Image (spheres, rainbow, N blue to C red):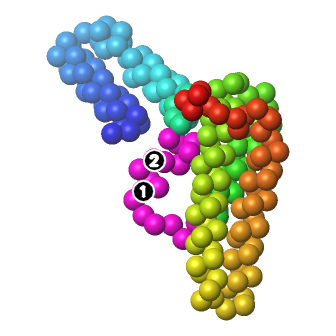
Amino acid sequence: MTTRLYLAILLATEAAAIGLVSYHYASGFLALLLAPVPLLTLVAALFIGRRMRSLAYRIRRLSPEDVTGRGARREERAVGPDELSRSIVERAEEIRRMLSGAPSEVQVEMCAMGYRACVNDMITLTNLLNEASCAAGPIKRLKLRRLRRRATDALSDARKALPPSALRASRQEL
C-alpha cells in the first residue's frame, strides 16, 4: 500500500474514534479536546508526503542497481533499438547533470558505474543496429544511424564530464 493510503486509513480511524468518544460521553469537553487531532494528522501526512517526494530522499534511496540499470525491469522484456538508444541518452544526460555540480566521491563512483553500463548497452545497441540495418531500407537506415549518433554523442558528453580518475579500477575490482 502507498503512504497516502496508510494516511487516509489513519485519518478515517481517528475521525471514527473521535466520533465514538463524543457520542459515548455526553459532555462536549472530551470531543473538544480531541478535535485538533485530525487536523494535526493531516498536517503530518502532508509533511511526510512532501518528504517522500523530495529529491534528497530519492537520492538516498538510490542503489547501484538503479544506476546501472540491472534491476528487474530491464530483465523482464527485450528492448528494441529505439528504446535502448533513448535509455542510453537519458542515463548519460543524468550522469552529466549529476557531475555538473559538486558531487561526492560516492556519487562520482556511481556515475562511473552508470557510464560503464551505458557503454555496455551501447555495444548491445550497435549489434542490434547492425542486424536491423541489413534488412532495412534507406530511410530506416538513416533513422538507425540517427539513433546511434544520439547515443554516442550523449555518451561522449558524459565521458567529458567524468573526472579523469573515475574510470580507473573501482574498489571492488582492486
Label 2 crowding class (10 Å Cα cut-off): few <14, some 14-19, many 20+? few
Categorize mark 1 by other alpha carbons within 10 Å: few (<14), some (14-19), many (20+): few
- Which residue is under mark 2? 71
| Mark seen at residue 51 | none
Q: Residue furthest left?
A: 24
For the point 79% across and 34% down, the residue is: 163
Name the kind of residue labelled 1 in the image. Glu
User: Magenta segment range?
Assistant: 65-84
Residue 158 visible in the shown view: yes
Q: Is residue 163 above or below residue 115?
A: above
Q: Amino acid at mark 2?
A: Gly
Whether 102 is among the magenta residues is no
Q: Nearer the viewer, residue 135 or 1?
A: 135
Q: Quadrant of residue 29?
A: top left
In the rendered image, the quadrant that contains the N terminus is top left
Would residue 83 be found to the left or right of residue 108 on screen? left
Question: Vertical placement of 44 versus 127: above or below?
Answer: above
Occupied quadrant, residue 140: bottom right
**Residue sitting at 65 percent across and 33 percent down?**
169
